[in-house]
Image (spheres, grey):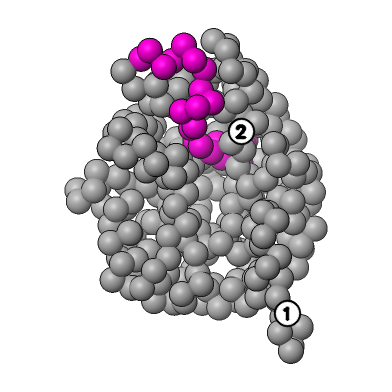
């Protein structure tokens, strides 16, 4: 799925919502624990209840890998189910990979090459710390995306990302500038936390055309209106991720209904934003 395809999907659904499938076995409704695969059953019901409002789904691989083979089976079932809606959703492997070139190649195969690994995500989050040769292997797959960590919303992000050199250039700004030359706006996105939304205006000067994946709206307190004000471009250019606020809107049997209501509420606000900016 290229940038124009993604924009058309956003226009079709009047939404730029990404649902993060951080499906913690310890937090899903207890009644599901009696099923053969509780995490998959949870994911399936979340997908069914939010599909009309979401353009993307982002499984956080840690929640699956931590459960070993059982977790990977849950992930495989989830991705096979999302494949049914292949033209309706964009899929992101939230893995934050980044290693020397030959290792990154294997990581890319593990999420992009369905024949080899069983998975065919549209995108994967990557860490750029090891440089060009650690990111470029992810860009070698046509139609796939690398989503580079740029400015994250966690407290520890200040340790490195805001470091300023003698030219008053912050480290995350150098990451944006340098990595944007390794690919194009059709295969590189950037992670920018919603709690750093006031910095989006400057980010757009460096990468005006790239999509931004913006976590932190919802449970982490990021503001959707501020993100849109500074982050939108003429192809929308943002995917706003919500995980806990949707997944765990209820811990009872009505969890899917509550998830649907939360996703609908976000979609309605996004539709209004898209209309106000003449993007639909």
Q: Residue at x 74, y 44 (%)?
A: 222
* Front residue of this view, candidates 4 and 99: 99
* Front residue of this view, candidates 106 and 207: 106
In the image, taking residue 4 as reference, residue 143 lies left or right, namely left
Quadrant of the frame with the C terminus: top right
Query: Which numbered marker is on residue 164?
Result: 1
Task: Give coordinates of residue 24: x percent, y percent.
Answer: 49, 32
How many discs appear? 2
Looking at the rendering, which quadrant does residue 240 occupy?
A: top right
- Distance between the alpha carbons at the discs numbered 1 and 2: 33 Å
Task: Give coordinates of residue 79: x percent, y percent.
Answer: 35, 36
Q: Residue at x 33, y 59 (%)?
A: 108
Lower sequence index among marks 1 and 2? 1
Q: Are marks 1 and 2 in contact (CB under 8 Å)?
A: no
Query: Which numbered marker is on residue 244?
Result: 2
Please give the range of residues in magenta: 13-35
Q: Secondary structure at mark 1?
A: loop
Task: Give coordinates of residue 151: x percent, y percent.
Answer: 65, 62
């Amino acid at each position: 799925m290229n940038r124009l395809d993604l924009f058309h999907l956003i226009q079709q659904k009047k939404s730029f919502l990404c649902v993060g499938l951080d499906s913690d076995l310890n937090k899903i409704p207890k009644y599901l624990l009696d099923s053969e695969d509780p995490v998959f059953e949870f994911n399936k019901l979340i997908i069914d209840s939010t599909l009309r409002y979401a353009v993307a789904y982002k499984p956080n691989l840690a929640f699956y890998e931590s459960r070993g083979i059982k977790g990977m089976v849950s992930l495989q079932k989830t991705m096979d189910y999302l494949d049914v809606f292949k033209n309706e959703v964009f899929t992101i492997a939230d893995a934050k990979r980044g290693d020397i070139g030959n290792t990154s190649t294997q990581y890319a195969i593990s999420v992009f090459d369905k024949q080899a690994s069983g998975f065919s995500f549209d995108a994967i989050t990557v860490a750029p710390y090891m440089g060009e040769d650690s990111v470029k292997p992810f860009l070698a797959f046509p139609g796939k995306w690398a989503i580079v960590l740029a400015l994250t919303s966690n407290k520890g992000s200040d340790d490195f990302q805001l470091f300023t050199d003698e030219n008053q250039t912050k480290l995350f700004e150098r990451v944006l500038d340098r990595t944007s030359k390794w690919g194009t706006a059709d295969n590189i996105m950037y992670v920018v936390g919603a709690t750093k939304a006031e910095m989006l205006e400057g980010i757009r000067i460096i990468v005006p055309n790239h999509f931004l994946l913006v976590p932190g709206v919802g449970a982490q307190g990021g503001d959707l209106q501020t993100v849109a004000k500074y982050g939108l471009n003429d192809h929308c250019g943002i995917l706003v991720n919500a995980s806990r606020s949707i997944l765990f809107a209820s811990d009872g049997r009505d969890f899917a209904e509550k998830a649907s209501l939360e996703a609908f509420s976000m979609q309605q606000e996004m539709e209004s934003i898209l209309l106000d900016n003449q993007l639909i």
